[in-house]
């Protein structure tokens, strides 16, 4: 897997406010949205385009448009939903599918509880979005799922990743170049409850106002 940690002052600034325990949910949601838009610029670098003839008010010319089949954006429920708009703002023609995956808090294994994806993903570039890459179990299960259905390329967009989670995904996918991770920060480690340190706490709870 290719890993790209986005090094940009706006990303660092917004991430610092996001991490702060005093940041309330409405600001947290807005910052996630802004961060994802910044990450999306990097994450879409390898979207396939094809030549299109158009005519400007001045002359005919040949440009590039996003090729078919359309990219597919897949938020992993529930926290990934908070990242959906940020990505589709830059990729408005993308199709959107949903994967409901949850970490079993005892076994820490990923369990799929909902799936709304096209059956055939042949040739599709898929963008998996989930704010926190912690143990990696959910992401590995989701990546496998997309490739089993024929995906051509999987780009994972996360806000914070733990080194342990990146190792797990790397061990599962090896050095395939058609899997990428675009992330705002790689943190220190996981704690004994599989929370990212320093992280930002529970992203779903902070997005949706539980705390
Ligand atoms: N999921 C979260 O929301 N936060 C973590 O730190 C780890 C997993």
Image: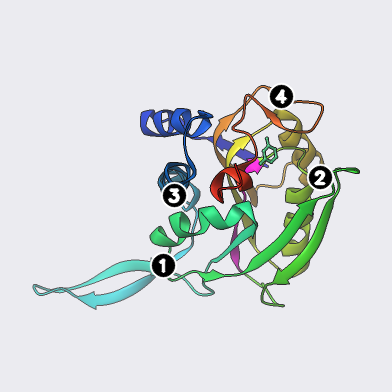
Residue that carries the numbered disc 1 in the rendered image: 92
SS under mark 1: loop
Query: Disc 3 or 2, which lies upstream in sequence?
Result: 3
Q: What is the number of the mark on residue 172?
A: 2
Q: Could you classify mark 1 by the number of other residues whose Cα lies within 10 Å: few (under 14), some (14-19), or many (20 or more)? A: few
Q: Which of these two is toward me, 129 or 79? A: 79
Q: Earlier in the sequence, mark 2 or mark 4?
A: 2
Q: The magenta stretch spans which residues?
A: 124-132
Marking on residue 189: 4
Indicate the position of residue 28 as horizontal and vertical percent values.
47, 42
> What is the crowding at mark 2: few (fewer than 14 residues within 10 Å), some, or many (at least 20)?
some
Q: Identify which residue is drawn at 59% across, 36% down.
A: 160
Which of the 4 image quarters holds residue 35?
A: top left
CA distance separating discs 3 and 2: 29 Å
Label 1 and label 4: CA atoms lie apart by: 35 Å
Image quadrant of ligand 1 equals: top right
Res. 135 image quadrant: top right
Indicate which label's residue lies in the foreground, 2 or 4: 4
Label 3, on which residue?
A: 33
| Label 2 SS | helix
């Amino acid at each position: 897997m290719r890993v790209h940690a986005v090094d940009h002052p706006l990303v660092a600034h917004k991430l610092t406010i996001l991490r702060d325990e005093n940041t309330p949910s409405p600001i947290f949601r807005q910052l996630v949205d802004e961060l994802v838009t910044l990450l999306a610029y990097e994450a879409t670098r390898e979207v396939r385009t094809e030549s299109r003839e158009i005519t400007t008010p001045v002359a005919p010319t040949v440009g590039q448009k996003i090729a078919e089949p359309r990219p597919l954006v897949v938020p992993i429920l529930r926290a990934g939903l908070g990242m959906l708009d940020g990505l589709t703002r830059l990729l408005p023609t993308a199709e959107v599918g949903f994967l409901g995956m949850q970490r079993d808090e005892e076994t820490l294994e990923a369990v799929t509880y909902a799936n709304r994806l096209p059956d055939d993903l042949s040739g599709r570039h898929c963008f998996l979005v989930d704010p926190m890459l912690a143990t990696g179990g959910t992401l590995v299960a989701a990546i496998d799922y997309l490739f089993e259905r024929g995906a051509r390329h999987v780009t994972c967009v996360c806000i914070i990743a733990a080194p342990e989670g990146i190792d797990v995904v790397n061990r599962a996918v090896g050095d395939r170049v058609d899997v990428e991770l675009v992330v705002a920060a790689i943190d220190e480690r996981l704690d004994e409850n599989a929370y990212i340190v320093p992280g930002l706490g529970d992203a779903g709870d902070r997005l949706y106002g539980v705390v």
